[in-house]
């Protein structure tokens, strides 16, 4: 059930993210011997992803190195229990904080003077050479950028990427760009294989965090902005704040919500949804809040309430009732243009049900659409449809 | 305004209402049913309550409009043991309070209206385009 557990045991040629949906996009994860830049233009929560990435490695029994300029290792170790218990021996710190706090350090790798970039480099390089870590996090470059000239920081960056590549590490730099102009940033990107960009927004008192992964080589992948959240003891999870389940009357929307979700509630009377269905589903490193709408036109005002911040739509149609397809198209328009959607050809086990291919031809929503056959009453095709929708939302160029 | 102070203000608003002896629970939700802040008993799922509150207030507003009854003010749901009061808090939010059956509803509503104005103000200061914010302190 947990996303982390479900991928353990696969081959570890790649540094997986532990978020199954993202690992699928990345063909298993980030390549070994690659450099990641965890980047934001303004302060946003990058550290949680870096921590998640390291802890995924630690739980896979990889050796990971964390170079921390902001937290003493004993504090970091305690904070990292928010990812659940872990084998502490797999996590090695380069302690660059104790000396700043005038505290003694019991770590093997200690930077005594953070005013010396030479020492920072030599201790970190020594740690990389001796421990041959599979994952390395430098937290963070802005600490260095505040103290040393840009050219020196870029040299430091280059040295570390060379050292990390030599031992097959996946190396992550955290960086908020306070300081550098576009040429400095360009230089950094040239030494980077993947940029993971972070952004936080607030709308109506509700905060959302998003990330976007871009592979920098020609023809590399690039995802859309992917909303995410942190779940205690699990880690970073892709999070869709609203997946709308809609479609014509009696298509099976409420049953989809009920049988897709781990927990759900339906506000229905006399067999029809009069307000909404709500449920919450966790699968493949994804959590989604699922809202089912009523189908009849007389309840359309409900749409206006819930058709906001929609990540994607599951458009449920009764595969035995093609005469309702026009209504289905109209309901899709009602939610808004340009949103990711998947058509669920429900009741596909009934006699006379049209095949997904036939529905694709006849529903009139274009050739590029995805149709998934389902039998909501038996739970067939529900998670499949959700997965197809999730991949559409995350997207990839 | 940074996000920390937005939530601080909203939690103060909730605390202010909870100080009234008749008020048992408070939820601030976005109009589309996303929970913003709450003080609820552990038995209730704030996400479900927020979605239901949005449907109650949204539907009541729509009904008032459909019936040609002017502007919506508030909605009251009565049960055997208590009352649920709901009203709009600006363009973005709604405010819901659960009160005792024998509560001084007038007093509670008066306070809720004041709080709704405060919520509107704090959410309005970061209105408009989605604003980017400082999240982590260090």
Image (tube, coloured by chain):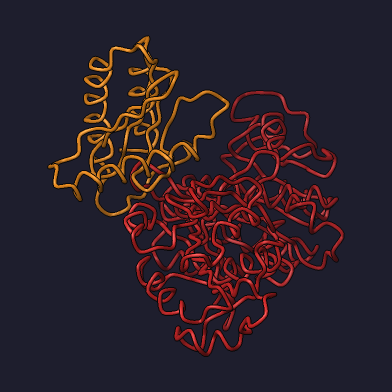
Image position, residue A334 (x, y; %): 35, 67
Residues B7 and B68: in front is B68
Image position, residue B41 (x, y; %): 52, 23
Q: Is residue B52 above or below residue A243?
A: above
Q: Is residue A232 above or below residue A29?
A: above
Q: Residue furthest front?
A: A270
Tint of chain B: orange
At x 73%, y 28%, the residue is A105
Residue A381 seen in render: yes
Image position, residue A114 (x, y; %): 59, 39
At x 49%, y 55%, the residue is A272
Q: Which of the 4 image quarters holds residue B71?
A: top left
Residues A96 and A199: in front is A199
Image position, residue A121 (x, y; %): 66, 50
Q: Is B62 placed left or right of A206 in the picture?
A: left
Q: Which of the 4 image quarters holds residue A388?
A: bottom right
Residue A118 seen in render: no
Tint of chain A: red
Instruction: Work out which quarter of the rendered image holds the C terminus of chain A and state it.
Output: bottom right
At x 61%, y 87%, the residue is A357
Q: Is residue A83 above or below residue A346?
A: above
Q: Is A391 placed left or right of B115 in the picture?
A: right
């Amino acid at each position: 059930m947990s996303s982390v557990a479900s991928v353990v045991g696969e081959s570890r040629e790649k540094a997986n993210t532990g978020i199954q949906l993202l690992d699928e996009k990345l063909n298993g994860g980030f390549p070994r011997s690659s450099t990641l830049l965890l980047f934001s233009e303004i302060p946003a929560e990058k550290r949680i992803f870096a921590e998640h990435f390291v802890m995924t490695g630690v739980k896979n029994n990889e050796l990971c190195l964390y170079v921390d300029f902001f937290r003493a290792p004993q504090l970091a170790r305690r904070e990292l229990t928010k990812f659940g218990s872990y084998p502490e021996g797999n996590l090695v710190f380069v302690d660059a904080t104790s000396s700043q706090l005038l505290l003694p350090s019991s770590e093997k790798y200690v930077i005594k003077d953070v005013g010396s970039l030479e020492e920072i480099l030599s201790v970190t390089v020594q740690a990389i050479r001796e421990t041959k870590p599979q994952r390395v996090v430098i937290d963070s470059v802005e600490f260095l950028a505040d103290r040393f000239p840009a050219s020196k920081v870029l040299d430091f960056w280059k040295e570390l990427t060379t050292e990390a590549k030599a031992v097959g590490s996946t190396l992550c730099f955290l960086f908020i760009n306070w300081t550098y102009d576009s040429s400095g940033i360009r230089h950094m990107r040239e030494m980077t294989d993947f940029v993971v960009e972070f952004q936080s927004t607030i709308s109506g008192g509700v905060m959302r965090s998003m990330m976007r992964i871009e592979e920098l080589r020609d023809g590399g992948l690039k995802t859309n902005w992917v909303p995410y959240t942190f779940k205690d003891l699990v880690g970073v999870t892709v999070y869709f704040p609203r997946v709308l389940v809609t479609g014509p009357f009696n298509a099976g929307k409420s049953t989809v919500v009920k049988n897709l979700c781990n927990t759900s509630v339906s506000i229905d009377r006399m067999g029809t949804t009069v307000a909404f269905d709500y449920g919450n589903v966790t699968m493949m490193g994804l959590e989604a809040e699922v809202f089912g709408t009523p189908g009849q036109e007389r309840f359309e005002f409900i749409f206006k309430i819930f058709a906001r911040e929609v990540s994607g739509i599951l458009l449920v149609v009764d595969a035995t009732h093609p005469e309702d397809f026009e209504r289905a198209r109209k309901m899709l328009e009602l939610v808004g243009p340009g949103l990711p959607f998947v058509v669920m050809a429900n009741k596909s086990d009934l006699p006379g049900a049209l095949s997904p291919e036939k529905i694709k031809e006849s529903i009139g929503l274009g050739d590029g659409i995805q149709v998934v056959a389902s039998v909501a009453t038996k739970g067939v095709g529900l998670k499949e449809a959700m997965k197809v929708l999730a991949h559409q939302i995350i997207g990839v160029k | 305004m940074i996000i920390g102070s937005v939530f601080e203000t909203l939690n103060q608003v909730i605390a202010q209402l909870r100080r009234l002896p008749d008020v048992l629970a408070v939820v601030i939700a976005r109009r589309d049913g996303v929970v913003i802040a709450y003080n609820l008993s552990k038995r209730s799922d704030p996400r479900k309550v927020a979605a239901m509150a949005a449907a109650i207030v949204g539907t009541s507003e729509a009904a008032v409009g459909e019936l040609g009854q002017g502007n919506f003010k508030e909605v009251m749901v009565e049960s055997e043991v208590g009352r649920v009061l709901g009203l709009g808090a600006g363009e973005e939010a709604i405010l819901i309070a659960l009160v005792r059956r024998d509560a001084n509803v007038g007093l509670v509503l008066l306070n809720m209206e004041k709080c709704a104005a405060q919520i509107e103000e704090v959410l309005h200061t970061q209105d408009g385009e989605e604003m980017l914010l400082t999240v982590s302190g260090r």
